[in-house]
Every structure is written in C-alpha cells, then in structure tokens.
Image (cartoon, grey):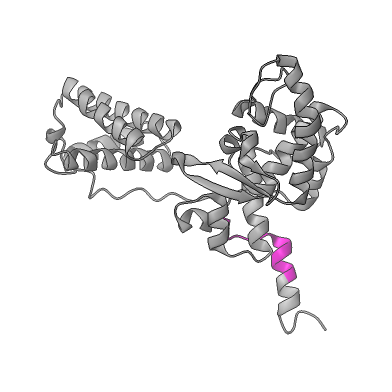
Amino acid sequence: MEEFFTQFQSFVEYLQIEKNASPYTVKCYQSDLESFSGFLNQEGIHQLNDVNHQVVRLFLTNLYNQKLSRRSVSRKISSLRSFYKFMEREKQVETNPFIQITLPKTTKPIPGFLYMEELEKLFEVSDMTEPLGQRDQAILETLYGTGIRVSECQGIKLGDIDFTIGTIFIKGKGRKERYVPFGRYAEIALETYIQEGRQKLLEKSGIETDALFLNARGRTLTVRGIRLILNKMVDNAALTVHVHPHKLRHTFATHLLNEGADLRTVQELLGHDNLSSTQIYTHVTKDHLRDVYMKSHPRAND
C-alpha cells in the first residue's frame, strides 16, 4: 500500500495548505484513512481504483461490527468521500465509490446550557484579591461574554484586546479571523487581571510573553489548564452540573437567542461558517417558553 500512503500524504497536505484545516481536523482525517487502509490491507486490496460499491458496503459492515456509533461511522464515510473527491481531482482514481453511500442519520442532542442562577454562583467563587482569582474571573467572563471556543480563548494575546471599542481579535478554526465584542463585566474583569494579577504572575517566571492568560508559574496557560480551572470553580460553587468551556459557548448562544438576537448575528459571533451549525441553539429554555406564552396568548391570563 505504498502508493496509498503517498496519496494519503498528498491529501493531508491539501487539508493543511488549501483547506487551512486545524491540527485536530487533520488528525481525525488521518485516523479515518488509517482505519480504511487497515481494512483494505486485510481484504488484500492494494489499489484505490479497486475499491467499488461492494467493497464500501463490506467496509460499512466492518464498522458496524465494531459497535461504532452512527456519528463515528458517519464521520469516517464523510472523510473517505472527501479523500476520494480529492483523488478524482488529482486524476488518481476514476470514480468515487463513496459518493452514493447515504450517511447514517445521527441525532443531534440539544446543547447543554446553564441557567442564570447557576452562572451567578460561578461568578461569585473567585477570590478577587488574589492573582489567580482575578485570572479565573477574567477567563469565565471572557468565555461567557464572547462565546469563543476554549482554544480561541487560550490563544488571545494582549494586543488582540481593544478596550476603546470593546472587541477582541480572535483567530478561529481553519485560521479564520473575526472580531468579537465584550461587555462591561468582561471589561472590568480583564482590566483588573491585566493591571494586577497578570503582572504578579509574570514576575514568577521572569519571561516576557504577550499571552493573555498565564498559569500559576507565569507561563502561557494551556487549553487543558483552562478546563481544570473551570472544574475547580464548579467544585467551589458546589454546582451539581458538569461545566466545560463549550457549555459556556452554548449558554452564550442560548441566552442571546432567548433575548431576541437574530440567528445570523449569533452565527457571526460564534464564527460558524454555516447557519445550520448555529441552528442547534434555537431551542429555548422552559422558563422563556412559559414567559412568552403568558405574555402573548390571549387566554393565558385574566
């Protein structure tokens, strides 16, 4: 399968250079292609052109026998469809055997979000007299106040923040860039942390860095570090719900839509390419649903 690995590497370079795919996305494609390569080797198939509809059906059966979820199977088929599409473009194969394969239907769970009561408890746990408490509060206010991804939060530099107009320059997925606004609470938390806590943390390392968020040793905070900080804040707030950075993103979108923001605006704020990615947030909370009903239905009240 030496020929396959050469073609496979060409596809990876295409993802990295032409598609500006993130390292995580490239890793997922690599995993899916390696899985397919192993299957072909097991079946004694050594040429991509030898893969036909029957081989693909056999591959699907193999995946289901592994007890993979519909979501995992769907992702693998989608990856291989894209791979063969690229191979067709490069005239390395004659047809795309995955083009007629119907992706298994996957149920899209409603994203989890936090109610304001839960958020208030989180906002109250940080010790604002300590550098780490100031940092943690700034992280929380930034994540909820902007709806950015944890990786985007981790990558913020001091120069990316414009306090005069209240925006942060964000480098998103696929190297896409956007400006996101932030409100008064995030502004206060960020200014306090930058002017006080961050300076004290920086003194511990003695290393100059323009990274916004630092760890306890004064070095750049990692994505994993941000997750651990949130977990600790949840424990201190005695919350029974599981809170991860993406749940704050879900909460940001849900609260905006519940308060009347239009879907297109939320799409831009979240940095979604497609509106369909944003539509999963169009569910509403039970409280909001009841409030709208009580205010709007002619026979809801006396």
At 29% from the left edge and 50% from the top edge, which residue is drawn? 102
Q: Give the quadrant of the C terminus.
A: bottom right
At 77% from the left edge and 37% from the top edge, which residue is drawn? 137
Q: Give the quadrant of the N terminus.
A: top left
Dominant secondary structure of the magenta stretch?
Answer: helix
Among all residues in the image, which is located at the extreme front? 164
Q: Is residue 274 above or below residue 233?
A: below
User: Relative to the observer, which residue lies in front, 178 or 231?
Assistant: 178
Among all residues in the image, which is located at the extreme right? 129
Asked which quadrant contains residue 63, the reply is top left
Answer left or right for 267 relative to 210: left
Asked which quadrant contains residue 155, the reply is top right
User: Relative to the observer, which residue lies in front, 164 or 149?
Assistant: 164
Magenta-span inclusion, residue 287:
yes
Does the rendering let one see residue 118?
Answer: no
Q: Which residues are magenta?
A: 280-291
User: Relative to the observer, which residue lies in front, 182 or 126?
Assistant: 182
Q: Is residue 265 above or below residue 295?
A: above
Does the rendering let one see residue 97?
Answer: yes
Residue 92 at x, y percent in the picture = 14, 35
Magenta-span inclusion, residue 78:
no
User: Relative to the observer, which residue lies in front, 282 or 109?
Assistant: 282
Q: Looking at the image, how many numbered discs can be counted on the residues? A: 0
At 23% from the left edge and 23% from the top edge, which residue is drawn? 5
Residue 177 at x, y percent in the picture = 50, 44
Answer left or right for 64 relative to 56: right
Asked which quadrant contains residue 219, the reply is top right
Answer left or right for 252 relative to 96: right
Residue 55 at x, y percent in the picture = 19, 36
At 46% from the left edge and 44% from the top edge, which residue is drawn? 176
